[in-house]
Amino acid sequence: MKNLFALLITLQSLISFASNNIEENSINPVKQTIIDTIPVRKNEPKKGITGLSVVNQDSKKFGKLLYIVSENYTEKNVIIYNNENQEVFSTTTIGDPIYLKKFKKGNYKIKVIENGKTEILDYNIE
């Protein structure tokens, strides 16, 4: 059931990303892009989180949203650091959005911990 839900979220993200369609008459038009995906080379074992990506979504109703997704639909600890390496946000999520309305513009590091594996991603808020 968890894998099915993760697959549905991934498919929805890919469909939205592929169409990249914003209807002017829509109540809550959405523009969604994948910000960072960790590449995997063939014949090289992956040590980090498999399929980890950051999905950015712009919504007129909710503002900027950030989703942390991976191949595993499991709990992720997410810690966001500013450019001075100060922790500015921390949460535990399973597919829930992170609202970016209150974040200042700038560069951030996103630390993701899933099943004992850790990845650190760069993220820029414009």
Image: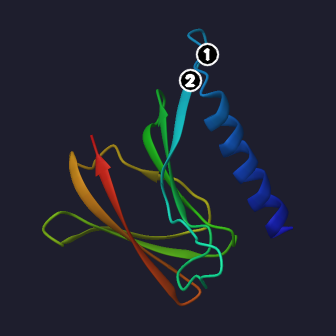
> Residue at the spot x=54%, y=90% of the render?
116
The answer to whether residue 104 is above or below residue 25 is: below
Q: Position of residue 93 (x, y in %)?
A: 55, 68
The picture places residue 15, in percent across and down from the top left corner, at 71, 37
Amino acid at pointer 1: Ser
Which label was assigned to residue 113?
A: none
Residue assigned mark 2: 29
Identity of the amino acid at label 2?
A: Pro
Q: Residue at x 69, y 73 (%)?
A: 72
Left or right: 79 as drawn, with respect to 86: right
x and y percent of residue 33 in the render? 52, 41
42 or 7, which is in the foreground? Answer: 42
Mark 1 touching mark 2, by CB under 8 A?
yes
Residue 26, label in figure: 1
Q: Is residue 33 left or right of residue 111?
A: right
Q: Quadrant of the C terminus?
A: top left
Q: Quadrant of residue 64?
A: top left
